[in-house]
């Protein structure tokens, strides 16, 4: 079984899909959209899974986002310093440009990781909703 195949946590996280059915989108717009980048629907359009499981549910995702961003920044600047002749200041300027485009994706991946830690995959979830309609 492939790690990125439907039914795995990695599939749901990297494709920003509902953790329960792996079909509905977690966000209203595309991954690199700066139009409403943080808006999520209340529930999954395919299986009805609630995306907000309680008040302040995504507070933990903030810590995951911080960890992802910190390691990316350290690795990116380290790679620039090691592989190019850029100065430290120039490397940080390049980092700021790159991170200004990736911050929305980091935010979304952190939320996807957090909800996937709390909701299990159910391959029959979307079928049950289709039958009840």
Image (cartoon, rainbow, N blue to C red):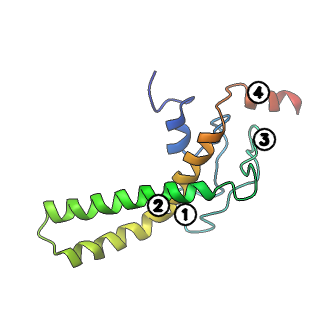
Task: Name the element at disc 4.
Answer: helix
How packed mark 2 is, by other alpha carbons closer than 10 Å (few <14, some 14-19, many 20 or more), is some
Q: Where is residue 53 in the image (x, y as percent from the top left)?
A: 74, 48
Comparing marks 2 and 3, which lies closer to the viewer?
A: 2
Q: Earlier in the sequence, mark 4 or mark 3?
A: 3
In space, the residues marked 2 and 3 are separated at their CA atoms by 29 Å
Determine which residue is flagged by label 2.
Answer: 66
Q: Position of residue 24 (x, y in %)?
A: 67, 42
Q: Residue 48 carries which label?
A: 3
Say which residue appears at 75% left-offset and 41% top-offset. Answer: 49
Task: Name the element at disc 3.
Answer: loop
Residues under numbered marks 2 and 3 in contact, where contact means CB atoms less than 8 Å apart: no
Say which residue appears at 62% left-offset and 36% top-offset. Answer: 22
Determine which residue is flagged by label 1.
Answer: 33
Q: Earlier in the sequence, mark 1 or mark 3?
A: 1
Determine which residue is flagged by label 4.
Answer: 127
In space, the residues marked 1 and 2 are separated at their CA atoms by 21 Å
In space, the residues marked 1 and 3 are separated at their CA atoms by 24 Å
Task: Name the element at disc 2.
Answer: helix
How packed mark 1 is, by other alpha carbons closer than 10 Å (few <14, some 14-19, many 20 or more), is few
- The quadrant holding residue 58 is bottom right
- The quadrant holding residue 117 is top right
Using residue 77 as the reference point, say whether residue 56 is left or right of it: right
């Amino acid at each position: 079984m492939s790690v990125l195949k439907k039914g795995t946590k990695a599939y749901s996280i990297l494709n920003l899909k509902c953790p329960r059915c792996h079909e509905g989108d977690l966000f209203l717009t595309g991954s690199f959209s700066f139009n409403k980048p943080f808006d999520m629907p209340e529930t999954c359009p395919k299986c009805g899974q609630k995306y907000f499981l309680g008040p302040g549910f995504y507070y933990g995702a903030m810590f995951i986002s911080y960890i992802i961003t910190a390691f990316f920044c350290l690795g990116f600047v380290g790679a620039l310093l090691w592989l190019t002749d850029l100065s430290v200041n120039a490397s940080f300027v390049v980092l700021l440009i790159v991170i200004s485009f990736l911050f929305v994706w980091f935010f979304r991946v952190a939320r996807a990781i957090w909800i996937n830690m709390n909701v299990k995959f159910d391959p029959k979830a979307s079928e049950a909703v289709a039958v009840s309609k």
